[in-house]
Amino acid sequence: MATGTDQVVGFSLVVFSLVIFTYYTVWVIILPFIDSDHIIHKYFLPREYAIIIPLAAGLFLLLFVGLFITYVMLKNRKPAKKAN
């Protein structure tokens, strides 16, 4: 059973994910159809970052997953037995 703290952290992560998803969706899908001189454009980064940020995040994710797998494999490696 989840404690109150676990539920608050989980709810916070869900809300944070929904905010990021909504921001990115508006930025990438809806914003190109709005005139470039509209005031809403000042709340969003330039469109180039719509590709750069997820690409960088994906590369960092792959890097950390690879480092974690390497660490676990090296930690669990058994020493080789000597043949007499």
Image (tube, helix red, strand yellow):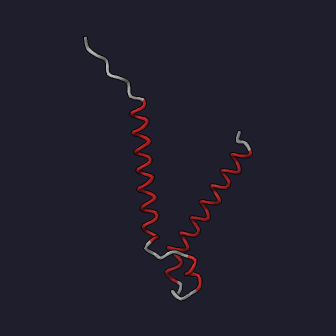
Front position in the image: 84 or 38: 84
Number of marks drawn:
0
Place of residue 1 in the rendered image (x, y in percent of width and height, measured from the top left): 71, 39
Above or below, 72 relative to 64: above
Across and down, in percent, residue 14 comes to 63, 56
Task: Tell me which residue sits at (56%, 80%) in the image.
Answer: 42
Among the 4 quarters of the image, the one containing residue 77: top left
**Image point (40%, 34%), residue name:** 73
Question: Could you say where residue 31 lies in the image, as x and y percent from the top left?
Answer: 53, 79
Q: Residue furthest top?
A: 84
x, y (%) of residue 20? Answer: 57, 64
Furthest-right residue in this view: 4
Q: Residue at x 53, y 74 (%)?
A: 27
- 35 shown above or below 74: below
Q: Which residue lies at the image location 43% right of the left edge and 54% below the top edge?
A: 60
Quadrant where the image shows the C terminus: top left
* Residue 40 vertical position relative to residue 17 in the rendered view, above or below: below
Nearer to us in this view, 10 or 77 = 77
Seen in the image, is 80 located left or right of residue 48?
left
Judge by depth and name the residue closer to the eye, 34 or 76: 76
